[in-house]
Each structure stands twice: as C-alpha cells, then as structure tokens.
C-alpha cells in the first residue's frame, strides 16, 4: 500500500503546479465550458480513491446518479485495495481498479489512465474525493464534457471542474456526497446505506472460517476493531482500554471477542491477542472485504475506532459502539439509534478537517480518546448485550 505521508507530499507540491497548468490550458482550449446538456449524457465516470468508509457512505449518492441517468453506462474508478466492495453492485456497469502498491505504480497510472478513460467517451464525471489533487487531475484529463467536484479550501483544484460544488464540512459525509450528485440534478430521498454484496462463495468461506474457530451458527458474536488507517493513527482508542473491555465482555457474557483487521494491521491486532492470553478469535488478515462484511453481519455488536469497518458494519445493519476524537462524529459517525458514539468533546477536538487535509498534529497525545473511560463504554456495551439475552 502506498505510503500516506509520501503521497501527501507529492500530491501537494506536484499537484498544485499541475492543477495550475491544466487550469490555464483549459481556459485556452475552452475545456472550462460544458458542450453537452445533462439530458444528452450517455457515459458517466465516478472516481473515489481513498477511504473504505467513504465508499460505503457514498452509496446513496450512487443510487441517486443511477436514478437520474438510468440508461447511461457508469464506470467506477477506485484503488485496487478496495477490490471486492462493489462486486456485483447494481448501479455500476464497470469497475476499474488503479494499482496503489507504490508511488511508482500511482505515477504510472497518471500517464495511462487518461488514455484509457478517453476511450470511453465520458460525458459526465464525478470526483468524490474532497481533498487531494490527483483525483481532480484524472477527472480533468478523462476528457469528460461535464466535470463535477468539490470546491475545497486550500486545494487549488476547483477550476478543473465545470461544476464546482462548495464543500460544507458541517454536514455528514453522506450528505456531502449527495450534494455532489445534486450538482448534476441527481436526487435521492432514501439515504440508507447499501449493504456490501456478499457472493455465496464468500459467505461459505467466512462461515467456514468461523467454524474453524469453534463458532457455531447459534453463537452470539461481538466484533472488535482496534485499528485506524494510516490517514490518522491518532484515531485509535488506547489498546489497554480495548483489552479491559474485551475481558469484561468475556467474564460477564461468556463471549470470546472476534478481532478483525487487514494483513497490514495484523501485527498490531496481535498485541491485543497477547494481552487477552488468546481468549479471543483473531481474524486479522484472514478475510476478504466481502468476507469481512459477512463476519460483521453475523455479529450482535461491533466495537470500533473511527475507520472503514465501522461503516461496513453499519451498512450490514449491525449495531455499533464507536470512538471519535480527532475526527468529528457529526461528520463520520454512524447514523441511527442502533449506534452508540463516544466523543469526549474537548476544546481541541475535532482537529481533523478537509481544510487541513486530514492531518493531525496533536500535542496532547490524543487526550480526546483517552478521556473516554472503559467504565463509560462498558455501561453501553453491557446494556446492549444484556438486552439480547
């Protein structure tokens, strides 16, 4: 997986200059004007690179776009690390995956993707990434006649779109994505998340994995995610807190928590497994994305940091308990009364925004998360599990 700080450095210092150059070229060639009406749209490109949780939260916007353009061919472009999220998704006709294993792979894609996309004769393109210039550059170079993207503070990219939509950080991310769809007259009354489609083979594989761990179909399951992506590791509730919470779950309810995570996160998850003396089931690195969705679907409760699997669980209609501090729960917290969010509300929290490119410079060692005590969380978790006895 690409190194996030390096990607940010290149995106900022190379991206700003490229955006400025293409802005000038666009004005000289008339690329800033729309040469087609929405009623003439037959081919659509949707780009969303970063963030598993963002992909899930964007599904109402995807439905809105499909409803507005029922006969158009919709191509979705994302990173290869997101493979499996939208397999068999009914609102996309084609999914393209960009390799993201290294900076070299990403730079190669910058030169090959535009030619690949131009062959599709794109009429309308949506750039769903609120920050970063790479996605904006690909959107411009795709040749799309109508280009819809965000006007985000300090990004210097809004001139690459024919329709720049103001980014309202006070809204939930789901509404932010719907704002972009509305920029092309695509509306959606139903804002529920689409569940991840799980092929039969993936259901069988995930169920077999749980069975290998000694779990029967009738067993009650609690999932735990101690991870947060490299975008901001500061979003992690303390490991010791997770360990104490897991012990209480086992002692009070006789349940061995299921630990999840990617292959890259497996060493960190192993630390919790050791603290629990193996009194848990560690599935980190052992599931695909659809397989993870199946595991979360079977969970009675999912306890998680602010991260992608939290949104997958919400999409699978699994109740959640989650922790927010650097990021604001009003923007990324699961919606609905099935979900309990803990947020200490310190004067410095939240500190992550799109305006600062989601970078954390915390001098207080994530006090906003350490202020959330195990006792506070246990009351909510115990009440939820006791209600299901």
Image (cartoon, rainbow, N blue to C red):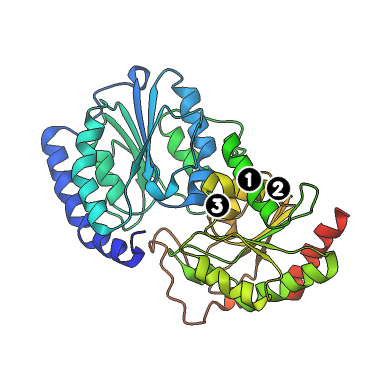
Asked whether, in this view, residue 262 is left or right of residue 220, the answer is left
The reply to whether residue 335 is in sight is no
Residue 195 position in % (x across, y down): 60, 39
Q: Residues within 10 Å of mark 3 (few under 14, many from 20)?
A: many
Q: Is residue 131 left or right of residue 252?
A: left
Marks 1 and 2, how far apart at CA? 6 Å
Q: Are marks 1 and 3 in contact (CB under 8 Å)?
A: yes
Quarter the C terminus occupies: bottom right
Circle 3 sits on which residue?
Answer: 287
Q: The residue tagged with tag 1: helix, strand or loop?
A: helix
Disc 2 packing (10 Å; few <14; some 14–19; many ≥20): many
Please, what secondary structure does the residue beneath circle 3 have? Answer: loop
Q: Is residue 288 above or below residue 261?
A: above
How packed is label 1: few (under 14 Cα within 10 Å), some, or many (20 or more)? many
Q: Earlier in the sequence, mark 2 or mark 3?
A: 3
Residue at 43%, 22% in the rendered image: 69
The circle drawn on residue 73 is none
Residue found farthest to the right: 389
| Tag 1 residue | 294
**Residue 27 percent location from the top left of the image:** 15, 38
Mark 2 to mark 3: distance in Å?
Answer: 14 Å
Tell which tag, 1 or 3, sits nearer the viewer.
3
Q: Position of residue 65 (x, y in %)?
A: 46, 29
Q: Would you identify the image quadrant in which residue 387 lies?
A: bottom right
Q: Position of residue 203 (x, y in %)?
A: 62, 41
Residue 45, picture quadrant: top left
Mark 1 to mark 3 CA distance (whole Å):
10 Å
Q: Are marks 1 and 2 in contact (CB under 8 Å)?
A: yes
Relative placement, left or right, of 45 versus 180 is: left
Q: Which residue is mark 2?
A: 298
Q: Nearer the viewer, residue 185 or 131?
A: 131
Whether residue 135 is visible, yes or no, is yes
């Amino acid at each position: 997986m690409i190194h996030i700080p390096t990607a940010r450095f290149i995106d900022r210092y190379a991206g700003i200059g490229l955006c400025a150059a293409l802005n000038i070229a666009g004005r000289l060639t008339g690329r800033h004007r729309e040469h087609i009406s929405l009623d003439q749209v037959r081919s659509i490109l949707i780009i969303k690179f970063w963030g598993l949780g963002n992909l899930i939260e964007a599904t109402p916007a995807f439905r809105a776009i499909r409803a507005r353009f029922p006969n158009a061919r919709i191509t979705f472009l994302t990173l290869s690390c997101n493979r499996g999220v939208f397999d068999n998704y009914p609102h996309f006709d084609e999914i393209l995956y960009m390799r993201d294993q290294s900076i070299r792979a990403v730079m190669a894609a910058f030169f090959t993707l535009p030619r690949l996309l131009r062959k599709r004769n794109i009429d309308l393109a949506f750039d769903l990434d609120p920050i970063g210039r790479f996605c904006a550059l690909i959107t411009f170079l795709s040749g799309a006649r109508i280009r819809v993207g965000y006007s985000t503070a300090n990004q210097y990219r809004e001139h690459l779109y024919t329709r720049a939509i103001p980014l309202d950080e006070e809204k939930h991310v789901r509404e932010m994505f719907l704002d972009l769809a509305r920029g092309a007259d695509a509306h959606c009354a139903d804002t529920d998340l689409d569940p991840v489609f799980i092929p039969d083979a993936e259901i069988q594989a995930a169920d077999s994995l749980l069975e290998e761990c000694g779990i029967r179909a009738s067993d009650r399951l609690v999932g735990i995610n101690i991870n947060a992506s490299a975008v901001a590791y500061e979003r992690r509730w303390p490991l010791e807190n997770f360990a104490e919470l897991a012990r209480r779950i086992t002692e009070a309810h006789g349940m061995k928590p299921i630990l999840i995570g990617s292959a890259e996160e497996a060493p960190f998850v192993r630390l919790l497994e050791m603290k629990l003396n193996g009194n848990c089931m560690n599935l980190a690195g052992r599931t695909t994305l659809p397989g993870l969705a199946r595991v979360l679907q079977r969970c009675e409760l999912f306890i998680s940091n602010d991260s992608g699997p939290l949104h997958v669980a919400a999409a699978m209609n699994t109740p959640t308990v989650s922790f927010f501090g650097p990021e604001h729960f009003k923007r990324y917290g699961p919606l609905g009364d099935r979900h309990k969010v803990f947020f200490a509300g310190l004067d410095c929290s939240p500190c992550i925004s799109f305006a600062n490119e989601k970078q954390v410079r915390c001098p207080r060692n994530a006090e906003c998360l350490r202020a959330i005590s195990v006792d506070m969380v246990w009351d909510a978790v115990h009440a939820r599990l006791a209600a299901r006895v």
